[in-house]
Amino acid sequence: MKQSMLYPRATSTRRVADMNGMWKFRLDKENEGEEQGWKNGIPGADLIPVPASFNDFYTDKESREFTGDFWYETEVFVPGEWKGRHIDVRFAAVTHRCTVYVNGQEIISHEGGFLPFSARIDEVVNWNEPNRVVVKGNNELSFTSLPAGISVTLENGRKMTKPFFDFFNYAGIQRPVKLVVLPEESIVDFTLNYALEGNDASVSYQVETTGDHPVTVEVYDESGKPVARGEGKEGCLKIENVHLWEVHNAYLYHFVLKVLDGEEVLDEYYDEIGIRTFAVEGNRFLLNGNPVYLKGFGKHEDSDIVGRGFNIGVMKRDFELMKWIGANSFRTSHYPYSEEIYQMADREGFLVIDELPAVGFFESLANFVDAVSGKTTNFFDRPTVPELKKNQLAMLEDLIARDKNHACVIAWSLFNEPDTMTDSAAPYFEEIFARAKELDVQKRPRTFAMELNSSPEHCKCHQFCDFLCLNRYYGWYLLGGYEMVNAETAFRKEMDAWLAKGVNCPMVFTEYGCDNLQGEHKLPSVQWSTEYEMEYLEMFHRVFDSYECVKGEQVWNFADFQTVEGIMRVNGNKKGIFTRQRQPKEAAYYFKKRWESLPLDY
Ligand code: GCB
């Protein structure tokens, strides 16, 4: 049976128990865990928080940079009153892959570090007793992993990760772990789609359950008043005088699903849903039929100490900063984010471009160095491609299953900066794009973020996009400093070439920005100073403002973030408009002024 991607919620028929906290932890430095039977209990283990990345807690480099298997263990008490129920252990994300054991028995293996998975455990648990849960994780990168990279072995025998991207390869149990108790007959999935007619909306729904009992759905408005009700596993509800979900004005209806046996409720689930439509028409984005311009950021889930671990406080602060600065959107660069972030975006009325972890599909020590070189790496010619595609399709299916009902999700970004210069890329892209369309009932626009080598002259894949996302660094990685004037000319030349090619769709700049050190001032400007950053941003915005087809600007990056170390990064990527501690740099005030003055339908 298909695995349920529903967010865990307690209802009259469901129970959810939190398994977060301090877990036992051990890096498998000698690669002995399997042989020594650590699945039955990890000897000499340390304690570490879950959820969090393991890397930044330790003071030694070997632990932070550790590449290989790492083991987690906890005990979970399973109450006897849950006997006869279906019990899942659910991991919102373990990066990048893992195997889970309960009381020594293997229950699931999962590939991919940014999407949830769960496994049924009621057949292996001891009732009314603590049960041992062990997770063997692994953080190695390869040509078949998403994201992609390699691992190398150093002279001292230690492995090291070499990502084909710049963000630090944080790993661990990075998102919450829960026990989910379900009735035997349960709701597995539901899918919503919307159409607007005058002041009314029709909400079509499909519900999937594990049995044949009848299903009802009910919709309540924000005051709790029932506004629609339907029977059957699929149907269409009419909502009169609908409150639409709008940017920064999000109205959420309470949607309740039930499986009934006469009067008895066999299962109940609920969600908060925003009713809206989103479409591309010519070179415009239409939200509820009205033009909308995207202002915001490429982000990362990244913060001090917990790394990529879900941090509810940082999430809150990020939304407050995005509201303060006048942003209305972000891209989940470069992987699907924690589920709570989409819930918050639904609540706050933000538009989200939801991205797969298909990053690093351009073999390079760090993507950014080669992104302007004209180099091709024939990435899609490799023998590893069928396996990679299998993994990407599986993640695409899970991503759309997980996020399809979020009002905030307006588009799917299926790759970040892949090598699109060889003919072999095209059939790969065609299949991924076609599958996304097939899976999404709402037919959200599909795209991928293109680096400069994916130019109007050389890109073999842009035609699959419903709109173009361009990551451009004119004036930073190329033609920087005093050459800025040439950067602007080159930039305009590229824009003209896209138009000359007949591209007639919205273009969003999903990356532009330059590294800047907080507090670094220089007159006249030099690269890395605030003054240079201002000149650079003004140049970009001048270009944006002179092309009608530019329908969005998402500066790179929302905040400074941790990267691999190297001569191109000063303890991390410093392109943040905010510091890693979420305080404004000077450019933040500049953006606030610009974004607060741009109309929504710019
Ligand atoms: C890019 C990548 C992004 C990097 C950024 C940079 O093109 O998509 O992951 O962080 O450039 O700052 O170099």
Image (spheres, rainbow, N blue to C red):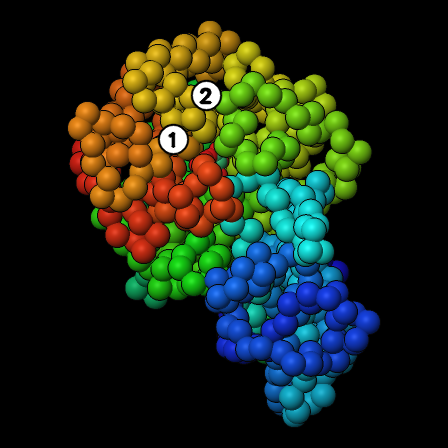
Residue 581 drawn above or below residue 420: below
State the residue at coordinates (56%, 18%): 374
Q: Observer-nearest residue: 102 or 520? A: 520
Q: Is residue 412 shown left or right of residue 552?
A: right
Horizontal and vertical percent position of residue 529: 26, 34
| SS assignment at label 2 | loop
Horizontal and vertical percent position of residue 176: 52, 67
| Residue most extreme to the front | 155
Mark identifier at residue 505: 2
The answer to whether residue 213 of the structure is visible from this angle is: no
The count of marks equals: 2
The amino acid type found where label 2 is placed reads Cys
Position of the C terminus, as image quadrant, is top left
Q: Is residue 452 shown left or right of residue 550?
A: right
Horizontal and vertical percent position of residue 477: 43, 26
Residue 562 drawn above or below residue 220: above
| SS assignment at label 1 | loop
Residue neighbourhood size for the residue with mark 2, other residues' Cα within 10 Å, grouped as few (<14), some (14–19), many (≥20): many
- First-in-chain label (2 vs 1): 2
State the residue at coordinates (67%, 84%): 131
Distance between mark 2 and mark 1 Cα atoms:
20 Å
**Residue 515 placement: quadrant:** top left
* Callout in the foreground (2, 1): 1
Residue neighbourhood size for the residue with mark 1, other residues' Cα within 10 Å, grouped as few (<14), some (14–19), many (≥20): many
The answer to whether residue 27 of the structure is visible from this angle is: yes
State the residue at coordinates (42%, 21%): 478
Q: Observer-nearest residue: 405 or 54? A: 54
Mark identifier at residue 512: 1
The amino acid type found where label 1 is placed reads Tyr
State the residue at coordinates (74%, 76%): 38
Residue 68 drawn above or below residue 410: below
Horizontal and vertical percent position of residue 281: 43, 24
